Structures are given as C-alpha cells and as structure tokens.
Image (cartoon, grey):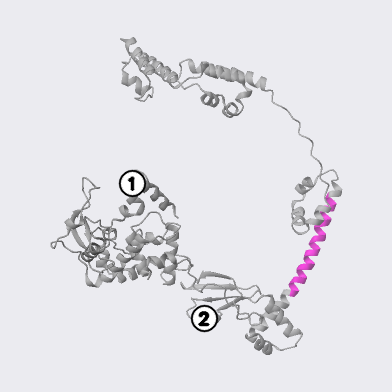
Amino acid sequence: MGWRVEKLITMMAGDKGGGIYTTIGVMPSAMPSNRVLRYCAFCVKEDEVRFGEMYWHRSHQVSGVLMCAKHEIPLTNSSATVVARQNKRHFIDIKSQISDSNSCELVDEKDGDHFIAIAKSVQKLLEYSWTSEGLSDIKHRYLNALKARKLATNSGSVRVREFIDAFRHFYGDDLLEKLNCEVDYYHADSWIMKLVRKPRASMHPVRHILLMRFLGMTPNQFFGQVETYHPFGNGPWLCLNPVANHYGETAITECKVTRDYKSPVPVGTFACNCGFIYSRKGTDATHDDKFKIGRIKEFGHVWDRELLRLKKEEKLNQRQISLRMKCDPTTVKNQLKRLEEGAVKKVHMFISSENERIKRRSNWLNLMESNPEMTKTDLRKIQPKDFTWLYKYDQQWLEENSPTLRRGQKYADKRVDWGKRDEELSKKVKLIIDEELSGKMKPIRICVSSIGKKVGRLALLQKHIEKLPLTMTVIETYAESIDDIQVRRVKWVANQLRAKRESLEDWKIIREAGLRKSHSQRVAEQIEVEVMCLK
C-alpha cells in the first residue's frame, strides 16, 4: 500500500477531510466537475422493483462518467445541485428529482464505446481494490506497456511524438476536449506525460483510465500485470554454442539489453556459463528468431578447447573444422591465430612477471638489511613502489620477509585537573557575566548556552557540567528566566531612548526590546514604570 493511500485513509477517518481532493488528484487535474446529481433511467426502475426504493449510484456521480456501465445509455441530469450548497449533508430523495423534463448527457455515437469503457472501469475501481506500491509502481507498469507497443525505448524513454499522435488518434480531439484532457507534444508538462515520467503529483482517476484503455487494458488487467516487458522474452534463453553439450537448451540466465547506436532498436547480449556470448538486434517476433545470432562477442573456453582438440588430436584442416563447428573457415583461421598468440603472450607475461618478482624482492631485502631498526611502515615510506607491488602480487612472501610487529607503548594517561579547570573557567564566566550586566550592549539572556558560546566552551559545559561545580554555581546565581531578560531589555531600551532624548512610548519600548504582544504582567508593569518615570 502506497503512502498516499495510507494518508487518504487517515484523512477520511479523521474529523477533517480537507485536502482529500488534492491528494487524489481531483483538484489539480482541471477535470470538469459535475454540477448536478445524475442517474440512469433504467437503474432507478430496477432498484425500485428489486429493493423497494430508488437510490443515487456513486459511479454515476464521478466526473468524466457520462454513461451507465450496466445499461450503456447516457446518464440523466437531475435538478439537485452538488455545488454552492449551504448544507452539504442535506438528504435529497432521488424520487423527487426524476422528471421527464430532465436532460440527458450529450454523447456522440462515435464516442459511445469509449464512454461505456470509462464507466465500466470506474465501476470496477469502486467495487474492487488492487495492490499497488504507489505512483512509481503505476508509472513502471505504464512504461512496460509502452515498450511493448514500441512507444518507449527499452531504457524507459518515451517516444513523445509517436505516443501523443497515437493517443489522439485513438480517442479523437473532440472526446478529449469534452473531458478537458487535451494533449499535445508542445507542452512537456501535459497531464499524460506526467503519468509516464517521474511521479510528482496525483492525477484524476479517469485520466489513468484513459491511458489504460489506450494501452488495451482494463484496470483488472493493468494491476494484474506484474512482469517487466522484455524485448527478447522472459528467460532463460537458448545457448547457441554449437559445440556445447547443452546447445539449443535454455541454459542462459543473463541477458543485457542495450540500444543500438545507429537505430532505436534494442540489442540483446546473451552470456552463457560455457563462455559463449552472442548478441542480436530487434525483438523476438517469432519462435525462429530465438535461434538467430547477430554477432559473436566471445567464443568461450568450451569452444576454444574443442577447436584445439580438432586441430591437434584429430588433425583436421580448417574447412573440416568449420563444418564440425558450424562456422566459416576464416573464423577458424582467425581463432587459431588468436589462441596461438595468446599462448605465446602468456609465456612472455609469466617470464616478465617472474623477473619483476625477483627484482622487487631483492630491493625489499636490501632495504631491510640497510635499515634494521626500521618498522615495516617506515620501510614502506622509503620505497612505496616496491612495497605496493609486493603487497598486490606477492603478499604472503612480503608478510614473511618484513620486520616483526612491535608492540606499541602504553599511552600515558594524563588526566585532566578538573578542579583547576573549574576554577579558571568560573573566573572567565564571571567576567563575561559582569560585562553582560554592565549595560554597555543589548542584553542577552544569561544561561548555560549563551555563556558557553561566549567563553568558547559550550560543549564542555553541556557534557561535563557535573565536573565544574564552581562554574555552575556562578551561572546559576546569575541565570535569567524569560521574564528576567525581558525586564532587563525594557530597562536597557528605556535608558537608550533617554540618552537619545526620545519620547518613551509603550509601543516603542515593545518594538525595540523585541517583545511579543503576549508578554507577561511583570514585563508590562516594568514598561509602565519606565514610561511614568520620564513623566
């Protein structure tokens, strides 16, 4: 369940329902709201026969629903308004609203099937509930469907022009305009693009239904779709290594899909445990497409081993080998050359590596012999390149041929003289408090936080105040409450105004002292004293 659903349930269960329409996407969608209650002429008759009374159907009141899902006829507008009512909880008897003079919703015959499908989808959404992880999950389902219709790339980029053109052709501009759901590719933030891009806001449910229907799905089919679209089908896939004993079997569990750099078609790369890796373009439209190879990227160890066996053990020529391995003779020639060059390269690399090993070991041993008192860390600083090479390629030898680890000396425990620190700090705190109370600057409340910041020891006072009794005593002696600091500010402001020979008014003192209107009686009395003192 997405967080929006949980939020809606909480809002609906609470006393206040404000914000529900915004959360579900009704308010920001600009979908035309119904101005009157509506009913189906056939439904009310059936309800009276079946239940003995008529009632309003909630599915008929949804914005965008113009036809009855059951009888497939246009809905009738009653005279009961649903907007600008003084009492929104007023009971309206549907029987009193039925009249032959009531008008029906205007629906073009060519759009009838669309409006019937919308009505049925709304009915399903109201009757059933489907599990969804939220807007991101819904967007993921939309993209899967768009990929299947070639309206989005495999990486998830929507082909905007093709998508919008197909959507407008499917519904027609008249129907979209009637629902206030017009779309075009000139506005990147149109409602339909918001549904298939990173979700940032809710959207009206009918707009979701429009997109689902365009993609050929009902709500039931849409929310039942859990598989991710794959242009080459769902795995496992076939291994097409002709010399493997599992040739033609579904032995590949890994398929990486990329985009062709020349065209927008997907490219699938299939890698098997036998080392055979191949790729092909496009989607698998038919069963035979699964047996096609576009390009072989790696032949693998199984293929290489069989190639060498046919060449060395069975003494076959290149053409005979190509027939056995189902490839071109040129391929056999090139791959034999690759294996021979690779073998020579490995020998050269081995010899080169051994020479390098001997050189690095010798350098390290000579360094140790020249500096017998140094630790491994000290030696490493002198010759970092030798140490790094040996650590990477010859670690066991390096460990066996390095100075033994020395035990570190026990740290000398130099404890803090808290008594001395407390005495020094208490004196500094007293000087700061005296300066604060001198009246030379605008008053700041005396407390642990303000004093700690001024003395530069806030963390010390907060964490180790119990070890500083003298300092704490000084602070507690002069500590001020809210009323204390406000009274002191009133006095300071009054003195400042007197020094400037300005008039003392209540509002002026309150403003300069930074007081709220809700200050205490004690502060109000002090303001009165200061004002009366001048008079």
In this picture, residue 166 sits left or right of residue 144 = left
Spot occupied by residue 485 in the image (x, y as percentages of width and height)? 44, 20
Asked whether the viewer can see residue 461, the reply is yes
Seen in the picture, residue 55 relative to 303 is either above or below; the reply is above
Frontmost residue, 56 versus 485: 56
Q: Which mark is residue 17?
A: 1
Seen in the picture, residue 303 relative to 163 is either above or below; the reply is below
Q: Earlier in the sequence, mark 2 or mark 1?
A: 1
Query: Badge 2 local density, few (<14 within 10 Å), some, or many (20+)?
Result: few
Q: Exactly how many numbered labels are in the figure?
A: 2
Kind of residue at disc 1 = Gly
Frontmost residue, 219 versus 239: 219
Q: Which mark is residue 102?
A: none
Q: Residue at x 76, y 34 (%)?
A: 411
Seen in the picture, residue 5 relative to 346 is either above or below; the reply is above
Frontmost residue, 50 versus 88: 50
In this picture, residue 115 sits left or right of residue 460 = left
Q: Residue at x 67, y 83 (%)?
A: 333
Q: CA distance from mark 2 to mark 1?
A: 57 Å
> Is 218 contained in the magenta span?
no
Query: Disc 2 designates what residue?
Result: 289
Spot occupied by residue 90 in the image (x, y as percentages of width and height)? 22, 48
Q: In which quadrant of the rendered image does the C terminus lie? A: top left
Q: Over which residues does the magenta segment extend?
A: 343-367
Q: Secondary structure at mark 2?
A: helix
Kind of residue at disc 2 = Asp
Frontmost residue, 245 versus 114: 114
